[in-house]
Amino acid sequence: MFELKNDQFLRALARESVDYTPVWMMRQAGRYLPEYKATRERAGSFMDLCRNAELACEVTLQPLERFELDAAILFSDILTIPDAMGLGLYFETGEGPKFKKVIRSAADVADLKVTDGDQDLDYVMNAVRTIRRELNGRVPLIGFSGSPWTLATYMVEGGSTREFRWVKEFMVQQPEAMHQMLDILAQSVISYLNAQIRAGAQAVQIFDTWGGVLSGPCYEEFSLRYMRQIVDGLIRENEGRSVPVILFTKGGGQWLESMAQTGASCLGLDWTTDLGQARQRVGGRVALQGNMDPFMLFAKPERIRQEVETILASYGKGPGHVFNLGHGISQFANPDHARVFIDAVHELSRPYHES
Amino acid sequence: MFELKNDQFLRALARESVDYTPVWMMRQAGRYLPEYKATRERAGSFMDLCRNAELACEVTLQPLERFELDAAILFSDILTIPDAMGLGLYFETGEGPKFKKVIRSAADVADLKVTDGDQDLDYVMNAVRTIRRELNGRVPLIGFSGSPWTLATYMVEGGSTREFRWVKEFMVQQPEAMHQMLDILAQSVISYLNAQIRAGAQAVQIFDTWGGVLSGPCYEEFSLRYMRQIVDGLIRENEGRSVPVILFTKGGGQWLESMAQTGASCLGLDWTTDLGQARQRVGGRVALQGNMDPFMLFAKPERIRQEVETILASYGKGPGHVFNLGHGISQFANPDHARVFIDAVHELSRPYHES
C-alpha cells in the first residue's frame, strides 16, 4: 500500500472514523489566488496551462501551500473529452468555454469516436503522474471528469447557456441520437477516469454541473443512467486501496435516493440541500460532500465560522462527511477567508468525531 | 358576484371540483406569437408596451384568441416596482433587463421609498381595468409581482446574473440593510398587488424567480419570510369571491412544506419537482400549479401529449391542480405545439375529474 501522510479524506469517503472532518474546495486552484494568476500568465492560454504538466502541477499544489487542505484535485478542464473528440475547445475572456464545432444532428453524432484516455488525453495523464510525484503522499489526489449529460450540453449548445434550448430540443426531438452520444461519452469517461486512476488519481469525482436542469424522469434517463454506467466501469481498487467515486449533480438535491443507488461512494451536495436531511435520506449508503454556499466566503470571518458550525451540526456526529463548498470558489473570494473556512472546519469538527 | 363564464381556474385554486384540469402558460403573451411581435413593433420599446393600457390589453388577449386557455395574465414586467422607485429600468436587446442605478450600500437602501401601487404604477392599474373590461368575464385575470428577494436581486446586480455575486455579498455582509430593503419591497408589493386586485385582478401570483439560488435557511430568512408578509397583507376577498395567491419559487422544490404554511392558496412548481410527491408533501393544504418543462414543447405532438398524461397521472385524481409550464414559454416555441399542449390537458384530464 502506498504511503499517505493524511488519509482523512479517503477515510471519510469510506465512512470510516476520522480525527476531524476533511475539507477541500471545488476550484481550489484558481483565479482567486494571485499565484495562480501569475502561473497562468506564464502559461499563455487556459488550455496551454492544462496541457503543461509542470505548470498544471504547480497550480494544483498552490492552494496546498497556503491552506491545510485534505485533498488535491487535478488541475484541468471538464471539457477535455469533447476537445479530444475534435470539437475545438477555446475560451473567450469573460464568456466561458466555447466549441468551434457543435453537435446538432444524428450525423454529427455518428462522426464521434470514443476517446481513449491514455492515447487521446496523455497530457492529462502526464499532469496526474507529475502531481502524484510532487505531492509525495501529502494528501490524496482527486481525478475528475464532466458527466456525459454535462459534456453533451456544451457540445450541443457550443458553450455556456442559461436556457439549454438546443440540448433540450435535441433530447426531445432525437432521443435515440442523444442516447447514442451519451453512450459514446460514458465510454469515453470510463476510459478517461480509469487512465487517471492508473496514472495515480486516488479518488474521482464526476461533475454533473447541468443535471439539475432536467425533470426527474429525464434526469434518470439522460444523466443518471450514464453516470451509473461509468461507476460500473471504473477501476475501484488500485495500489492496494479502494478508489472512491464522488457524484456531484448541481441542483440534484431532489434525487439523492436514486443517486445513492448507483454504486457511487459519495454524493456531492450544493448549498440548497439540507445536509442533515440528505444524510437521513441516503441512510448511510454513501458519504456526503458539501455544502457551504461559495458566496458565504464573502461574509465576515465570524459569520463564516458560524456557517461552518451550522453545517457540521446539521450532519451531526460520526463519519461520512467531507466538507466542501456547494460549488466552485468564486474568483472574487478573499484567500484569507478561504483559510478561515478551512481552519474552522478542522477546529470545529473535532467534537463531532470524538467517541 | 361578478359573472365568470369559465371559473375552472379559480375552482382548482380553491381545490373545488372541476370538469377538467385548467391550464395557462407563464409568459403566454410573448415573443413566440407573431401577433405579439407585431404589436410590440407598433408600441416601441418593451416598457412602452407595458405603459400603454390598450396595447398591453391587446397582447394579454392574443393567446386567448388562439388557445382555449383558462386564465389571462396581466401583461407587464416583474421589475415595475424598482423602476417606480427610480432605478431606471431599460432593456438591451438580447441581454435582458438592466437598471441605470444599482443598490449596493445601506445609504442606497435608506433612499428607497415604499411604492404606492395606485399612485406610482397607475399605468399598470389602467391596464388591469382595460383587460378586465375587454375580457368581459371570459376567464379570470391573474395579476402578479416579483418577490422581494427576486426584485432585490435585480436591484443589487443591476440586471440579470448567473452568479448572484453582488446580491449575495450584500446579503452576507450587510444583512440588516438587506432586510430593510426587503421590507420596503414587501410593503411595496402588498400595495401593488392590492391595487391590482381592486382594479380587477381575480388571482395574484408572486414570482420568486431567484429564491432557488439560496440555501434553505437563507431562503427562509431572505425570501420566504417576505412572501409570508405579503400573503398576510393582501386583500383575500373581492367582488364577492376569494382572491387566491400563487407562490412560485423557481428551484424551490425542496421547500414546499414551508411554502405551504404561508397562507398561500397554491404553489407553483418547476419541472424538476415530482408533482405527485409534491402533492403528498403539502398534504392538501394548497393547490399545485405546473409543471411541464417549457422545452418539452419542442418535441413532436405525440411526445407532448404523452408528457401531459404523465404529469396528470403523477398528480392523480381529484381537484387542486392547475396545469402550467414549469417556467415561461420559450420565445422559440411553435404556437401549434402550445395548442397541442393546451388541448391535451383539457382532453386527457377529464377522466381524472369524473366522480
Image (cartoon, coloured by chain):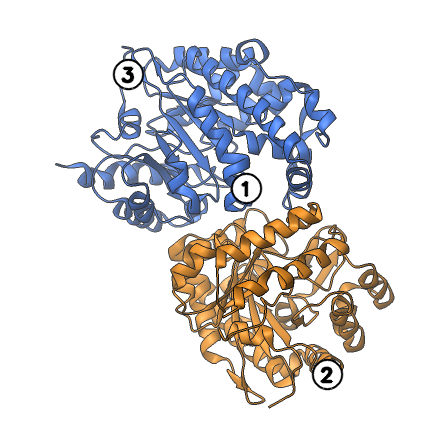
Chain colours: A blue, B orange
**Does residue A270 appear left or right of residue A8 in this picture?**
right
Task: Let me know if marks 3 and 1 both belong to one chain.
Answer: yes
Q: Earlier in the sequence, mark 3 or mark 1?
A: 3
Q: Amino acid at mark 1?
A: Cys
Taking B308 as reference, is A81 above or below it?
above
Query: Which residue is under mark 1?
Result: A218
- Local SS, label 3: loop
Packing grade of label 3 (10 A; few <14, some 14-19, many >=20) is few
Snapshot quadrant of residue A340: top left
Q: Chain of mark 1?
A: A
Q: Does residue B270 show up?
A: no
**Residue B255 image position (x, y, % from top left):** 41, 58
Packing grade of label 2 (10 A; few <14, some 14-19, many >=20) is few
Taking B185 as reference, is B38 above or below it?
above
Snapshot quadrant of residue A324: top left
- The residue at 43%/73% (across/down) is B263
Q: Nearer the viewer, mark 3 or mark 1?
A: 1
Question: What is the C-alpha distance between the residues marked 2 and 1?
Answer: 41 Å
Question: What is the C-alpha distance between the residues marked 3 and 1?
Answer: 41 Å
Question: What is the C-alpha distance between the residues marked 2 and 3?
Answer: 76 Å
Q: Chain of mark 2?
A: B
Q: Amino acid at mark 2?
A: Asn
**Residue A208 image position (x, y, % from top left):** 50, 34
**Residue B48 image position (x, y, % from top left):** 79, 69
The numbered disc on residue A4 is 3
Q: Quick check: marks 2 and 3 in contact, CB under 8 Å? A: no
Query: Which residue is under mark 2?
Result: B136
Q: Does residue A151 show up?
A: yes
